[in-house]
Image (cartoon, coloured by chain):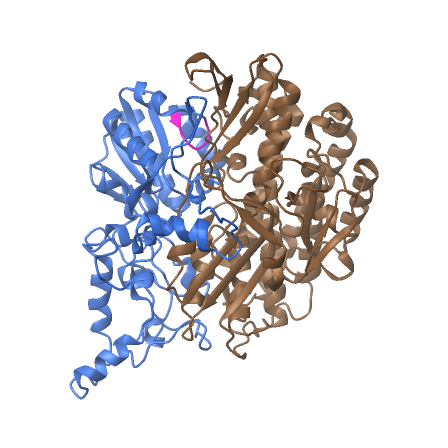
Amino acid sequence: MKKQVKIAIVAGASCGGCDVAIANLHERLLDVVARSDIVFWHTIADFKKEDLEKQRNIDFGIFIGSIRTEEHLELAKILRERCNFLIAFGTCACFGGMFGLGNVAERYELLKVGYITTPSTENPREVIPGNKFEVNGVDLTLPRLTEWCMPLNKVVNVDIFVQGCPPIEEAIDKFYETIIAYADNGVAPERGTVIAGGKTLCDICPREKPEKITIKRFRRVHEGPIDPNKCLLAQGIICLGPITIAACNAACIRANMPCRGCFGPPPDVLDRAAKFISTIASLVEIENEKLLSDEELIKIVEEIEDPLGTFHRFTFPSGLINKKQEDAEE
Amino acid sequence: MKVIKIDPITRLEGEARISILLDDNGKVKDAFFQVMEFRGFERFCRGRPVEEMPRIVTRICGVCPWAHHMASGKTVDAVFGREPTETAKKIREIGYCAHMLDSHTVHFYFLAVPDLLVSPDAERGQRNVAYLGKIAPEVVKEILRQRRNITKIETIIGGKSIHPVCNVPGGVSKGLSEEEAKEIEEYAKDTLKFLDIWLEKWEKEILTKYEDLIYSDVYHQETYYMGIVGDGNTLNFYDGDIRVVDQRGKEVFRFKPEDYLNYISERVEEWSYTKFPYLKPIGWKGLVDGPDSGIYRVGPLGRLNVIDKISTEKAQEAYKRYIEAGGKPTHFSMFYHWARIIEMIYSCERILELITDEDITSKDTVNYDGDFVGEGVGVVEAPRGILYHHYKTDEKGLVEMANLIIPTTQNNPSISLEIKKAAQKLISNGEISEGILNRIEMAFRAYDPCLACSTHSLPGGLPLIVTVYDSNGALIKEIRRGGK
């Protein structure tokens, strides 16, 4: 039996790109809107937390963004309790996203740099926003930052993951089909579904790949011309293709830039950085491996600047090591 | 004392809420415009290879990723001491003009047009593009078609329309083919025709219909203005000197991007995650306008107030009529909308100039020569106003310091002031009505505070909740509009 699907959309810390991606599907979005009852939309409307709390039996709860303030955390929990299927929409919700790199520092340090040490800031009293602030008994205190930035599944169970930064039209379409199938025929999506396909970017890469990739030295994108037709790793340029899901049509690679992994890893990857390190390790001087000493091999690998911000640029909070460790260097 | 809380949690480079304080006589005493989110970019950009920055900072804002990508691209050019090739500069500027069209069309057609074509006093559910789609489906269809073409230009140049990747130190990662150049030219020509119709509509219909509203002193602030000017003080989004004019339109400061710290300071308040920038030589005097207050405005209104002319024909004609109607500088906030149409026309004309340039399809897109400097400032005009990026690196080119001054932040003092003034004029004896709420909201929406625009297009509207508290903080009244 056909029914109106109840949808709630809630946002955590996000750049708004996911919302724009949804808005860019305008005509089709209107179709879905016609079939659904949107009971909460954090981004476009002034729904308060209490409005979400009042809801029961939401069919699909869509969460955009990562968890960065206590308000986000609370909203995620309320949404989970009140919806049947919870969707992590976009890379931030799925893996923590770019803001997850904030986990290189404790929250006070993030605030201190933003509000005290940046060179244009004039803040002699060293005021930091977020402390208790009341006007005539009315609480105007800002939501506090959570201790660390987190993906949605660190705080609640997630049923469906829609990967992408932002997800591409085809992925959003597929997700809509899921909603419509549920509305028309009552077909429930399988829990744990990842809407993005199972291949890696290398599987769909348009570039020529040598039989065997051997990296003699690593180089950065500014160091010299990049061959637009040849595998980037084979040119010694770090490219996250081997550990990135093929859900972006290889847009950056086609624009002659290496992949930075913004669509996230395939579903079976436990720790993306660890996986990439093992991939890279197997490519370094593979032909001469036996002729070189360990020191010589290590020296080549050490040429990679900023492994954390490169391998885990969008996924740090979902890694096995996911925040600043005591006494650790970045 | 009463506190009125307007809680629109709309996207504004994060979430925001407005609280208005009344005194015992029901008059507006103070207003708080609070931005509720902080993510920590200045800290976590440290340690990153600086050439990667253009691809990191795009995530500051998914609505204007191109602005951050360009400011960052120019900053890393400076860090590496590289001058981009002529072809690269032109390709960047084409992509950037397309982005100006992308951002301005979202704002103008999904936000301003429904407000002005329907009626500011109409029911909320009727003031969105979906309702417009019902009463004028062909118009909406055409708007969407134009937007699709504009994002295609962005994709050709940037790889992706949201979070582009093309900027590398000294140029762009890929050149344009003859076919791509032809495609871009066709789109720009088509969009220019479409804009002609809307300019006429604005000048002949909307302006006359809403004269009272547009020229109302509710939406009038006398502030300083800041923006980039090209050669001969022309409009330029990509490069030039920074010019500041006063309340009378007289140039008071003119400086190079790298000297920005002598002219801008940012104040911090504990009740907002957004800072309060002001002109350093003038100083901070609180939320007031006038010559003694360092508050300045940026964005389309600011840009058209700091320039003397526009280098392209149609836009310049339109600009002349704009000045005749509003004066120079014009202080009417509703002129932000008119300014956006003129800037869209300029963007199309500028794309057409650049795309027909003979070396636009040259393969010489990156200059790899230059002496590493280790520090740079990059400035562009973002759709919402001037944007500053400033990085310092170590000898390996890893970022040690990143400072970012964002347009909506620079307009933050003005938005706060604007809301306060609108509330003072429109609320008396604690009485508030729906029409009044709409108009307070319009006051800050003129600035196009980020996602408020694109999201506004969707059915359901943007309800407001106003909560009135007595002097003990107890809730005495709650007024809701729209939504569920």
In this view, A32 is above or below A313: above
| Residue A188 position in % (x across, y down) | 23, 30
What letter labels the chain drawn in blue?
A
Between A246 and A123, the one lying in front of the other is: A123
Read off the magenta span: A40-45
Q: Is residue B119 visible?
A: no
Q: Whole-percent x and y of residue B22?
A: 55, 19
**What residue is drawn where x is 29% and y is 78%?**
A215
Residue occupying the point 74% across, 52% down:
B252
Q: How many marks?
A: 0
Task: Let me know if residue A92 appears in the view.
Answer: yes
Q: Position of residue B13 (x, y in %)?
A: 48, 42
View extreme (bottom): residue: A291
Dominant SS type (magenta): loop
Q: Position of residue B90 (x, y in %)?
A: 63, 64
Tint applied to chain B in the drawing: brown
